[in-house]
Amino acid sequence: MRQFLVFVRKECYHIFRDRRTLLILFGMPVILIVLFGFAITNEIHHSPIAVLDEAQDTYSRRLTERITSNGYFDLYQNLHSVREIEPLFKKGAVRMVIVIPPDFGSDFYHQRKAAVQLLTDASDPNNATTLVNYANAIILQYQQEITGHPALPLTIHTEVRMVYNPSLKSVFLFVPGVMTLILMLVSAMMTSITITREKELGTMEILLVSPLRPLLIVAGKVVPYIVLSFIIALIILLMGFWIFSMPVKGSLLLLFMECALFGLAALSLGVLISSVANSQQTAMMMSMMGLLLPTMLLSGFIFPLESMPLPLQLLANIIPAKWFNIILKDVMLKGAGLEQVWLPTLILGGMTLFFLLLSIRNFKTRLS
């Protein structure tokens, strides 16, 4: 055991001497959290719009003020004719144009209903849908304030309440996803590259003739990355809490135990890749194509799995990141305990055991 601990300490020294590795390990979480938290977001703020107010009455002006005074939309230009709309869209100056017809005030006052046309640039359909939803919500609120909620026959009143994320912050989705991505990057990719580098440089044979057993050598290689994974996970949680007010409603102990389980699964995948790859470049490409891309695309991190074709949904079930992402969101946002996340935990644990046994068996085969 003393020799094993000395070997682990030597590996830690080796990691901390490599500045490029440290930059990847500690710089990547910070960069990804900032990018996904601030730059990559589904929320809309200060989107430029134009208004074609053909009514020019009190009701239309109050509606325009209401739409442009909430921080979601900025008035780029007041238009005077329909011919001005298309040039603005082609130029990319505005994302939406609100057209208020000439009889807007009269219809609203006498008939209690009036039409408003919303024209959006649908070259980005997700953005256009979000803009329309925001504008419809503002118009509906304005209508209810003016009419005083009239009781009409067979009127259906809907009350919407967003649970777990009432402000609809997209960063609450990205923080668990970034944690999944970083743990996979550190545990799998760095482990596979580290072990493959020893094989490529010819130092693995020197290590194998040492008093340590081959499995202890591999364990000594991966133990520092397990510790680093915990440190990085803690950094991501602290950044999410301090910068974006990301809640952690569940048990921290359960959260870190799940991180350890996923980290062990990723480490076993890294060892498996290193037993197959003969060069660092091959190990990196296999990690990127076989682990990181599926983690980003098929884990529910960025794209909802429900909207994907059935074959891709079935393929996502064999990716550990999908189940870990479910566990993270349930524990952090819903405050779930082990009794709520036992099924994804059991599936993730089964995958971890399978990959661990497969990597040990394959590594022994390659050594012999």
Image: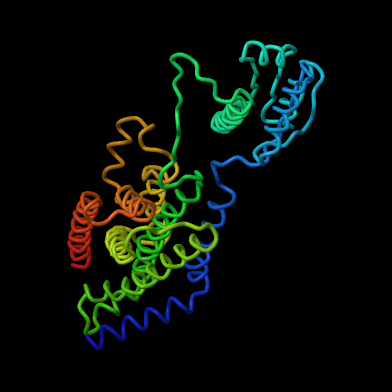
- Give how far across and how far down residue 207 sits, in percent: 29, 79
Task: Using the image, determine if residue 143 lies above or below residue 250.
Answer: above
Q: Quadrant of residue 81?
A: top right
- Give how far across and how far down residue 53 sits, in percent: 76, 20
Q: Residue at x 24, y 88 (%)?
A: 2
Quarter of the N terminus within the rendering: bottom left
Left-right relation of 312 to 34: left
Residue in front for this viewpoint, 210 or 246: 246
Q: Residue at x 34, y 76 (%)?
A: 203
Task: Using the image, determine if residue 282 lies above or below residue 130.
Answer: below
- Give how far across and how far down residue 196 sits, in percent: 35, 66
Task: Using the image, determine if residue 107 lies above or below residue 98.
Answer: above
Quarter of the C terminus within the rendering: bottom left
- Give how far across and how far down residue 269 sits, in percent: 29, 58
Q: How many numbered tags mark residues here?
A: 0
Task: Using the image, determine if residue 111 lies above or below residue 243.
Answer: above
